[in-house]
């Protein structure tokens, strides 16, 4: 399944191939499906939305077909911040330890013991 965003993406089910023809559905499944549809249903007018990306690509194709030379400026990739995984793990463990130490004694006793798995 996919969310439809633009009017040109909405097609008739008759044009789709490979749909099963004889599917048995229980009343419960139909009721659940209808409830889901009703909860998500709203007036949808796909013509209100424009696919700007597609329009720009089509414009480039038309300009290229007319013989214009298309020059694309390469964007500089931003360097992702380097994460020190060891420091992040140590900070996470320290925070968990601080939380555990701050619990009242009766809560510590109520927590079930973890089972160790053998490798």
Image (cartoon, helix red, strand yellow):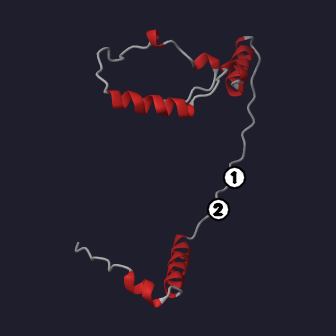
Residue at the left extreme? 118
In the rendered view, would you say 2 is above or below 112? above
Q: Residue sitting at 51 percent across and 29 percent down?
A: 37
Most extreme residue toward the bottom, as rendered?
105
From what the image shows, is residue 72 above or below residue 57? below
- For label 2, the crowd category at 10 Å Cα-Cα, with few meaning under 14, some 14 to 19 and many 20 or more, is few
The disc placed on residue 81 is 2
Q: Which mark is residue 78?
A: 1
Pick the front one: 96 or 83: 96
How packed mark 1 is, by other alpha carbons closer than 10 Å (few <14, some 14-19, many 20 or more), is: few
What number is the disc on residue 113? Answer: none
Q: Is residue 80 visible?
A: yes
Q: Where is residue 94 drawn, in percent x and y? A: 53, 82
Q: Indicate the quadrant where residue 117 lies.
A: bottom left
Percent across and percent down for residue 53 are: 69, 27
> Residue 100: where, in percent of width, then height?
49, 83
- Percent position of residue 32, x then y: 41, 33
Q: Position of 83 compared to 28: left or right?
A: right
At 61% from the left edge and 64% from the top edge, which residue is drawn?
A: 82
Answer yes or no: is residue 2 visible.
Answer: no
Q: Quadrant of residue 81?
A: bottom right
């Amino acid at each position: 399944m996919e969310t439809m965003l633009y009017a040109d993406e909405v097609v008739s089910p008759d044009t789709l191939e490979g749909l099963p023809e004889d599917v048995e559905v229980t009343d419960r499944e139909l009721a659940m499906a209808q409830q889901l549809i009703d909860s998500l249903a709203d007036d949808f007018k796909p013509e209100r939305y424009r696919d700007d990306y597609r329009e720009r690509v089509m414009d480039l194709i038309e300009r290229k077909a007319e013989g214009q030379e298309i020059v694309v400026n390469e964007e500089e990739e931003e360097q992702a911040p380097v994460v020190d995984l060891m420091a992040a793990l140590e900070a996470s463990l320290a925070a968990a330890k601080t939380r555990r130490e701050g619990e009242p004694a009766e809560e510590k006793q109520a927590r079930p013991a973890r089972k160790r798995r053998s490798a």
